[in-house]
């Protein structure tokens, strides 16, 4: 990893950037402020999400859109509004490529913000590098997203989250042999569940992967394969709806007490405890890539206020939504610290984003940074929650994930003085 760049005075300006409440109607204010709604030539920003089988990742871009609406109502960036242009790739590689081309080449956006998809990053990572545009993503789920020069995300993805869940299963639940249930999507299931296998092997323990066909997932067959593996712990690494279906099949077989049960982040959604019911109370432990959804920290409270004021009532309040808010906030901070004349210059915006270093939020367990690098994963520590009493209870505060994958990241953070 190349030496990461310090942001200097711009970073100090960014670090002191906070939202506040408006006296008029009590709505939150976002961005550098100014009071009057933004006017003039808009700053074009793009976003791509996936919404089709096997899941809906639109909460990230919906949250980013709500934040940008708040920014525009609060005075914009250098007095100018953000025009947020969003496309749905429908989990289709061809549509993902078309969406990126439309936004980057036709609309000439200065950056991508809030991207969340299984396939979009795999398809478009080389395109973003060639076009010299940064994607400040919020729902990365594939290896290319974290192993690219021009993509960085506020979420940590299935590899880190699954290793976090596996660590908890081993250290707190006595797991000796984990069956990791994932999706047979290139650079997703094999990458993340494969990392769980490597982590377990490093501990002298066992693990195996069960990868479901995303087009026609057979949760019954997947459960039977997990049972046949000889595992004593099952790690569900699936989108929330599919994970719930998998656990319902396990409930039909009354397997709750035969295994310890953990999950990567997608199950950390307010709708999940009611969907699972009392059978799973106190039995499903979920790794959360960001902090508690009901956290009392300033950023978490601001996120909730922004969603209530500028989002829709049915927009999810989940981890991807937190991540979308955080990406949009960091992007806004970065442009606000730039000279006004440069915010339409894609090269200047890309350079400014790559200089981000050491931003902190109560939403995340560690600092956010970018830098000139081919590997970006600033978020690689999380918390654990358990489904309990119709909601979630935190059972483990911020902890760092182990494994060789994280070593270059940790070394870079030490060099930057971020640890």
Image: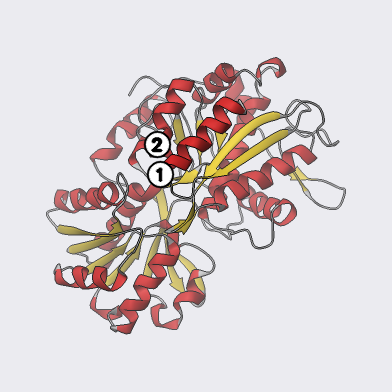
Residue 97: x %, y % from top left: 46, 36
Considering the image in quadrants, where does the C terminus appear? top left
Considering the image in quadrants, where does the N terminus appear? top left
Q: Is residue 340 visible?
A: yes
Residue 338: x %, y % from top left: 65, 20
Mark 2 surroundings within 10 Å by alpha-carbon count, few (fewer than 14), some (14 through 19), many (20 or more): some
Q: Is residue 388 above or below residue 217?
A: below
Residue 21: x %, y % from top left: 78, 47
Q: Which mark is residue 119?
A: 1
Residue at horizontal 42 percent and vertical 25 percent from the top: 416
Q: Is residue 419 visible?
A: no
Relative to 230, 280 lies left or right: right
The residue at which mark 2 appears reads as: 123
Q: Is residue 331 above or below residue 138?
A: above
Residue at horizontal 77 percent and vertical 34 percent from the top: 33
Label pair 2/1, CB-CB below 8 angstroms: yes
Q: CA distance from mark 2 to mark 1?
A: 6 Å
Report the front residue among 30 and 186: 186
Residue at horizontal 58 percent and vertical 57 percent from the top: 295
């Amino acid at each position: 990893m190349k030496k990461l760049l310090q942001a200097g005075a711009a970073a100090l300006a960014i670090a002191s950037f906070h939202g506040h409440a408006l006296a008029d109607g009590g709505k939150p204010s976002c961005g550098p402020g100014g009071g009057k709604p933004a006017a003039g030539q808009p700053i074009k920003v793009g976003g791509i999400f996936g919404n089709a089988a096997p899941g809906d990742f639109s909460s990230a871009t919906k949250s980013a859109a709500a934040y940008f609406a708040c920014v525009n109502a609060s005075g914009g960036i250098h007095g100018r509004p953000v025009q947020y242009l969003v496309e749905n790739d429908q989990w289709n590689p061809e549509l993902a490529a078309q969406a990126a081309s439309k936004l980057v080449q036709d609309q000439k956006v200065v950056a991508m913000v809030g991207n969340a998809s299984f396939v979009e990053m795999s398809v478009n990572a080389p395109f973003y590098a060639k076009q010299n545009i940064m994607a400040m993503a919020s729902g990365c789920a594939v290896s290319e997203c974290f192993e690219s020069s021009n993509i960085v995300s506020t979420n940590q993805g299935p590899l880190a989250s699954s290793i976090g869940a596996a660590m908890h299963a081993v250290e707190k639940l006595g797991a000796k042999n984990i069956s990791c249930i994932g999706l047979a999507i290139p650079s997703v299931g094999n990458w993340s569940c494969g990392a769980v296998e490597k982590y377990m092997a490093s501990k002298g323990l066992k693990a195996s992967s069960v990868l479901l066909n995303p087009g026609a997932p057979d949760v019954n067959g997947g459960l039977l394969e997990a049972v046949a593996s000889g595992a004593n712990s099952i790690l569900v690494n699936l989108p929330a709806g599919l994970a719930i279906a998998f656990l319902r099949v396990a409930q039909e077989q009354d397997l709750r007490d035969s295994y310890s049960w953990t999950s990567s982040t997608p199950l950390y959604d307010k709708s999940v405890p009611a969907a699972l019911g009392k059978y799973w109370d106190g039995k499903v432990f979920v790794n959360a890539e960001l902090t508690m959804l009901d956290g009392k920290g300033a950023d978490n409270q601001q996120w909730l206020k922004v969603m209530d004021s500028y989002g829709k009532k049915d927009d999810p309040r989940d981890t991807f939504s937190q991540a979308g808010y955080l990406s949009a906030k960091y992007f806004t901070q970065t442009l606000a610290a730039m000279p006004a004349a440069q915010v339409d210059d894609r090269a200047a915006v890309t350079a400014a984003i790559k200089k981000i270093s050491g931003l902190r939020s109560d939403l995340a367990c560690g600092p956010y940074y970018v830098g000139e690098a081919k590997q970006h994963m600033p978020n690689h520590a999380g918390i654990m929650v358990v489904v309990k009493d119709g909601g979630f209870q935190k059972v483990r505060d911020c902890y760092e994930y182990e494994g060789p994958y994280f070593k270059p990241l940790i070394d870079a953070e030490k060099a930057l003085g971020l640890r």
